[in-house]
Image (tube, grey):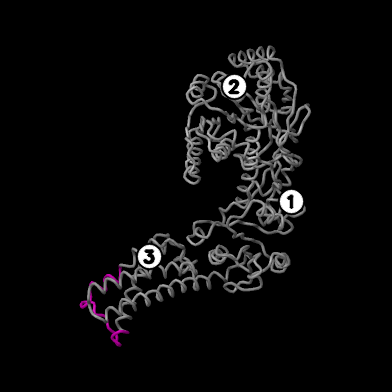
Amino acid sequence: MEAIYKIFNISRIYKQLIVLTNDIILSLLSLFLSFSLLYQKPYFPFFDYTLIILIGIFSFIPFFIPFGLYKAIFRYSGIYSLVNTFASISFYGLIYFLIIIFANTGELNISLGILHPIIFFIFIAFSRITVVLVVSAITNRNKTINSIIYGAGKTGIAASIGLNDYNILSYIDDDINKQNKKINGIKVLSFKDTFKFIDVKLVTNIFVCISKLSEEKRRDLILSFDKYNVSIKFLPNIDDLVKGNFEIDKLHSFQPSDFINRKIQVTHSEILKELKDKIVLITGAGGSIGSELSLQISEYNPSKIILLENNEYNLYNVENLLIKGLEVNKNNYEIIPILLSITEFNDLDECINQYNPDLVFHVAAYKHVPLIEKNIFSAIYCNIFGSINIINACEKNNVKKLVFISTDKAVRPTNIMGATKRFAEIYIQSYNKIKNSKMIISIVRFGNVFGSRGSVVPLFNEQIKNGGPLTVTHPDVTRYFMSIPEAVSLVLEVTYLDNFGGIYLLNMGKPMKVLDLAKKMIKLSGYTEKNEFNLNGDIEIVFTGLRPGEKLFEELMINGKMEVTINKDIFAVEEDFVEWSDLTKVIDNLNMSIANNRIDDSVKILGSITNLNYK
């Protein structure tokens, strides 16, 4: 038995060579059997028909390779592998038959051209099925993970073969024509019968095998199994299953949208009027928000998208994303990647002057709270003076609209990151009041986004995969959350809603305890929480303490009055700001403190403007 396992665990290239050798031998045997049947006695006239025999032995290979017969995982071979095998041998058989006809070697060999491919297919199919049965017989003894497959279609059936280490007890399918029937010996249940089955059979895994599953349906599935201690995994498409291009342990169990149950309002026709045939520039285009913004803007047929980024790798990634979008959507916009820093005014001014954008989305900022606490001057340069550079360069070059992406951390800030973003907000508010400008500058303020780099969902997914613990800063820490696509869609809404310049808040829904999110992700991953009441649990949650500058609760508004806009998910707010004459003096003082390398003075100056509550 151990020797068989060693065979299964050898390198994939050696497995492919073994299977290829097996197929050559089977081709040789099928020729021997074909001749023997035609001559009605054991007969293999190699020297009489050398060319025909050599063609029969080796000419199938150019047909097997394109059909992927050596790419599939052989022990998972099923009906789809047999279909591919039949198709490849059919093409091969036709060519072999024509060769024999043109060779004009007699009536007997014409019969050989028909008989040999048939016998060869039987041998190949039998060898593949034998491997599946032998492996299944061995591994079935060790199958202890009771599982259900949601979806009894092609992908689900392929999964039942591919998930060889799992004990597949049943399918679930919404098609009443499939329910209470068996597929490959596995019964198909209706959705309502599943829950009783989970309890009785001690099911621990549910594999969802439905292609093009909507976010809403996916979220409903997760909520449906919320009461049960089961792991839910969403499997890839059928091609990846058959070819083995996936690993169960590396599948992402959850997406940000799985935990957000709301539908935002997006008026695509109005956004199209703002963006179609326009030149759009995005700063920080390679970040989480910037890249999504770039992708969504690309769908509205702009003439040019200017990707401004100071990180080469991020710029490379977002440019490739848009190039792929061009290939898929057949749009005709121009992609212009620009590698520069917003802290360099001359470079920025030259860029905006050269490309003359109609709209600018200013996303670039340093956002990671703990890192900024250790790099205060860098944050001031980027988040404050970089923003001032953007505004001045846009004003100088007659940009029509500028959208500034802010954060809920700017509200009564307790950290440098929030204070620098609030300072930039105040600058824009003052600028809008004092300057006789035709440029509209909008501020869009929202909270945490699921799925951004460093956010909790990918962090918790990784920690769960590693066996824990899950790290939460405080048991009462609460955050507003929305998905990146939601946030970006609403940012685009502001482009047509705002014709004067103001502050806009996005509907963040109800705040969520990070601890509750951690507990839910542990449960839906099929594990139990390890705590004082359950010492034998699987994964522990540990509290690491609030980080410097971190709040327990986030807010979206300081002290202004919030008004609903024509979009129910976007609110306009007016808040206090500093008069322009006073603000310019503060900026001069801030510059001086930085020039003299006085961090404490810089923090005090920030606090004097933003009401920074800094410890």
> According to the image, label 3 marks what residue?
64
Q: Earlier in the sequence, mark 3 or mark 2?
A: 3
Tell me the SS state at disc 1. loop
Q: Which residue sits furthest bottom?
A: 40
Q: Which mark is residue 176?
A: none
Q: How far apart are marks 2 and 1 (CA)?
A: 52 Å
Front one among 483 and 535: 483
Front one among 283 and 254: 283
Q: Which of marks 1 and 3 is nearer the N terminus?
A: 3
Measuring 66% from the left and 55% from the top, which residue is drawn there? Answer: 217
Location of residue 411 in the rendering, given as x and y in whole percent from the top left corner: 73, 28
Location of residue 496 in the rendering, given as x and y in whole percent from the top left corner: 64, 32
Q: Which amino acid does label 3 sit on?
A: Phe
Q: Which amino acid does label 2 sit on?
A: Ile
Q: What residue type is labelled 1?
A: Asn
Q: How far apart are marks 1 and 3 (CA)?
A: 55 Å
Q: In which quarter of the image is residue 227?
A: bottom right
Tell me the SS state at disc 2. helix
> According to the image, label 2 marks what residue?
391
